[in-house]
Amino acid sequence: MTAYLARRLGYYAILLVAAVCLSYVLASTALDPRAYFEGRRPPPSPEAIDAQLTALGINGGTPLPERLWHWLAGAVHGDFGRTIDDTSVTAEFGRRLGVSLRLLLSGTVLGTVVGVLAGAWTAVRQYRLSDRAVTLASFLLLSTPTFLLAVLLKIGAIKLNAVLGTDLIQFTGEKDPDLHGGLLAELRDRGVHLLLPTLSIGLVTIAAYSRYQRNTMLDVLGADYLRTARAKGLSRGRALVRHGLRTALIPMSTYFSYGFLALFTGATFTEIVFGWHGMGEWLVESIGKDDINSVVAVSAFAAVVVLLSGFLADLLHAALDPRVRT
Amino acid sequence: MTTESVVAAAADAVEAPLGAAALPGRGRTVLRRFLARRSALAGMVVVVLLFVLAFAGPFLTHWSYSDIDYTALRSAPSAEHWFGTNRIGQDVFAQTVRGLQKSLLIGLLVGLVATVLAAAVGAGAGYFGGWTDRSLMFLVDLLLVFPSFLIIAIVAPRLRATGWLAFVGLLTLFAWMITARVVRSMTLSLREREFVRAAQYMGVHPARIIVRHILPNIASFLIIDATIAVGGAVMSETALSYFGFGVQSPDVSLGTLIADNTGAAVTYPWMFFFAAGLLVVFVLAVNLIGDGLRDAFDPTARKARS
């Protein structure tokens, strides 16, 4: 099992380096930081722009491989260069990391746990009313793009707040900047702000996972070993969880890594809609400013997160399926 | 990202469509099963109606999507403006059908081209194996790791001058990878079958084997996947257009319409909800068709009573 996981990890490391280099090359060729400085009023002299670009390490005059090498040498030591406004990318990265990770984590946990449970439950109750209701709801959710769901949730919250006459559900930003209170008040405030963004990425994930889990669970339900488990005296619930759900989870580990890709994109959109200052918003901002180093940092983050989820899926697969461990 | 379980899942699916060409009237059987499913039939009807609306709609009203009616700003739906007007007096019906048209065209093109690409890459990688397989799958993994949103967002504004077809190309570039993986694993098991072996020993050209022997056997998967891909492409297109990275003004798509009128959704709902509603209805209908096709092609996948 260790050899298997080490092999996967090595492959992911190569993929990561390739993806980061590719995004550096792409960002450097497509973005034009010179235009950003030339667009300033009053425009700086060409010499000043040149000097500034060189200082930031993004001067088009320097050959691309040299710039890439310089950037990589810094990145290995945790220095991702300077933003176009000459602040540290690493510092900005640290500020935004927590914001994005909180949203990704809450969305993933909500989506995976509820999705898997809902799928398993509807499979057991196939063609009952509850199964049909969940199926219909998940079809509707799967047909709504995440950005639209986020917008609809926001509209719903505005209407609800208007009806109640208070700001019950807060939905702008990740916290109330004017809040002064103890730790408890702050935690509550953050939790309320987390509610709608989590729902907007979590609901789609629930819908997707419950469909997959329902299918894999249905395949398992008729299996002989489940009948054997019942025959040797296990209760129905125990047999379903220990022998049914566990087997049905194995193919799910593959969906998990693909599902995370969709979730990550959805989180980007959700951040922008709800005004969270996370990675997704940073990406859109830095593209607008032709900020090469920031764009590369965000794409490196995305690659790491996606590969990490892939590795987690491998771990899960190895833990559930003994055949992989050899 | 393991492929083992996909292989296992795909192996079942390969069994089902065998003899697609051999059995006469299979198409008719599939069609009968498809039509027997009410939800799939309803999805089909809705998609046809939406296409009719998108392409005949502009001729039903004398307003064009860019016309401005200065006498009616923010007016509610009426006989003159069926879906009302927006804040600068443009006819919402004309804009919505125009946006629908663009979104449907983009979705259809991306769905079709991506499936063809996925079939070619997946079957090639699975059939030839070795380094072809390894390098193609590395490419697939690389594109999966890359945040597609990032590349489209960087590149799309630079392609503004080339119009929306370049945008279709970009969307396609990031829509084929997962399908290609499944096609590859299906091809892996088909490659060992007698009829492929026979063709190989007879000296048939590999490209011909793929087109004549491999692809027809996974046709049902490809048809289903292309259907679902159309819905997915429409969702990607609207999302990117919503954030200003997709279809550019003066052209409109459902995404740009939703983006422009989100702020008015509470006070002037007609500006927002027609576009948003049509988007959801279309994707839902496409998904229902895909689901119906899956059951029609492979009734064994649907256990017990139905």
Image (spheres, rainbow, N blue to C red):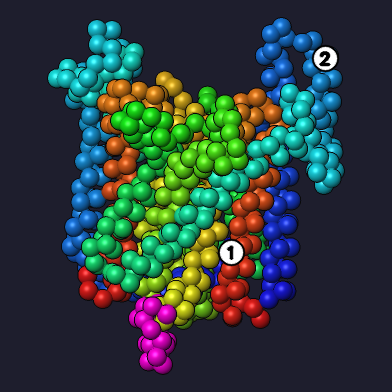
Pointer 1 chain: A
The picture quadrant where one finds residue B3 is bottom right
Say if the magenta span includes residue B33: no
Taking the image as shown, residue A73 lies to the left or right of residue A28, namely right
Instruction: Please name the residue shown 23% across and 50% down the image.
Output: B44
Q: Residues within 10 Å of mark 2 (few under 14, many from 20)?
A: few
Taking the image as shown, residue B164 lies to the left or right of residue A304, namely left
One can see residue B106 in this view:
no
The C terminus of chain B appears in which quarter of the rendering?
bottom left
In x, y percent, where is residue A11? 70, 62
Residue identifier under label 1: A313
Which amino acid does the dot numbered 2 rest on?
Ala
Residue reaching furthest bottom? A232
Which is more toward the observer, A109 or A72?
A109
Sequence-first disc among 2 and 1: 2
Instruction: Please name the residue shown 82% across and 35% down the image.
Output: A67
Q: Is residue B242 above or below residue B201?
A: above
Which is more toward the observer, A253 or A120?
A120
